[in-house]
């Protein structure tokens, strides 16, 4: 993954070193919180998230880039942080087993007809409801809070898989290699994560704001 | 008897129930489904509004998260603690 190279190539050649590297403390004030949130969401452990942020700044200091704007600087730092987080998962995938199949073992069995003619069909009152104008929620801060809270209820491993695949958009094969799991296991975990998240958002957002 | 079993399993493949259809829709977000599975899913979605909604919604959840990374990240309530902030600053000073 050449995230860092990709980020660097975005910078125009004549960019003024307006935001010189001489002041890394300013980095901590300007970008520290965002990077910490970004890392915490994925690592689910404040200590690890802090470490990842610190490593990111140290690597950035060594990298010795300077940028002509706050947002270019921020995306460069996020690029480094992403690599640090991936490194963490690679290590964790080697050391522990990443599959969490206990979670939602019944695949929402309570929402489907258990037996008889309609077996495996949605129990109609419990099936997915219409989400009216779902797209209009995307600017609503409270919607994102609900989304985050729902994602926060997933078991740690399932959440890690969900974030890598759905939020960061990393290809399935790459996620499997990183976490050392089979594609079959990845699909099962993702299916359950999506199912739980959909249900949680329906109950806690769409049903209330209809 | 064997013959009937074969017919039965062919039917089951051609007409997935909802539980199978939602699983297939999730899988389709991660890799292209084999043709037979794609066709049977399509048939199922023609007649099942619940599974149609389900598919639309899990797709919405993905697109929302990927397209609004900033909002998603900012919704995280915890911030870097003052102590951690100071520690990192000191560490950076040492490196300079």
Image: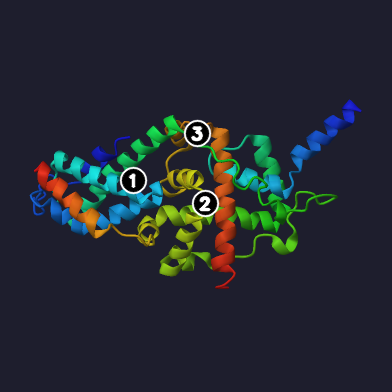
The disc at residue A154 is 2
User: What is the spatial separation of the Cα atoms under label 3 and label 1, in whole angstroms?
Assistant: 19 Å
User: Going 50% across and 34% down the picture, which residue do you hit?
Assistant: A97
Pointers 3 and 1 within a single chain: yes
Camera-side residue of B65 and A16 = B65
Q: Sort mark 3 into few (<14), some (14-19) or many (20+) by Cα contacts within 10 Å.
A: few
Chain under callout 1 = A
In the image, residue B21 lies at what x, y percent? Answer: 68, 46
Which residue lies under the disc numbered 1? A48
Q: Which of marks 3 and 1 is nearer the N terminus?
A: 1
Which residue lies under the disc numbered 3? A97
| Quadrant where the N terminus of chain A is found in the figure | top left
Residue A140 shows up from this direction: no
In the image, residue A60 lies at what x, y percent? Answer: 18, 43
Chain under callout 2 = A
User: Going 48% across and 37% down the picture, which residue do you hit?
Assistant: A172
Chain under callout 3 = A
Q: Do the residues labelled 2 and 1 touch (CB within 8 Å)?
A: no
Pointers 2 and 1 within a single chain: yes
| Quadrant where the C terminus of chain A is found in the figure | bottom right
Secondary structure found at label 1: helix
Residue A62 falls in image quadrant: top left
Q: Which of marks 2 and 1 is nearer the N terminus?
A: 1
């Amino acid at each position: 993954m050449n995230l860092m190279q990709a980020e660097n190539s975005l910078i125009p050649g004549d960019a003024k070193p307006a935001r010189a590297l001489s002041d890394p403390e300013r980095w901590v004030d300007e970008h520290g919180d965002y990077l910490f949130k970004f890392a915490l969401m994925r690592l689910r452990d404040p200590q690890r998230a802090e470490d990842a942020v610190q490593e990111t700044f140290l690597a950035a200091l060594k990298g010795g880039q300077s940028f002509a704007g706050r947002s270019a600087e921020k995306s460069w730092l996020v690029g480094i942080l992403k690599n640090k987080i991936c490194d963490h998962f690679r290590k964790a995938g080697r050391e522990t087993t990443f599959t969490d199949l206990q979670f939602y073992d019944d695949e929402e069995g309570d929402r489907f007809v258990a037996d008889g003619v309609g077996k495996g069909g949605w129990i109609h009152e419990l099936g997915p409801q219409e989400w009216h104008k779902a797209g209009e929620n995307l600017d609503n801060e409270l919607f994102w809070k609900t989304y985050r809270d729902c994602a926060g209820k997933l078991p740690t491993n399932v959440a890690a898989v969900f974030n890598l695949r759905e939020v960061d958009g990393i290809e399935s094969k790459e996620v499997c290699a990183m976490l050392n799991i089979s594609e079959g296991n990845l699909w099962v975990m993702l299916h359950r994560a999506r199912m739980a998240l959909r249900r949680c958002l329906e109950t806690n957002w769409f049903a209330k704001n209809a | 008897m064997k013959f009937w079993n074969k017919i039965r399993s062919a039917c089951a493949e051609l007409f997935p129930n909802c539980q199978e259809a939602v699983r297939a829709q999730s899988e389709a977000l991660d890799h292209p489904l084999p043709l037979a599975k794609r066709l049977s899913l399509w048939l199922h979605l023609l007649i099942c509004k619940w599974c149609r909604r389900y598919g639309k919604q899990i797709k919405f959840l993905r697109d929302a998260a990927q397209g609004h990374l900033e909002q998603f990240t900012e919704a995280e309530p915890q911030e870097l603690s003052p102590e951690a902030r100071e520690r990192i600053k000191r560490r950076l000073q040492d490196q300079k």
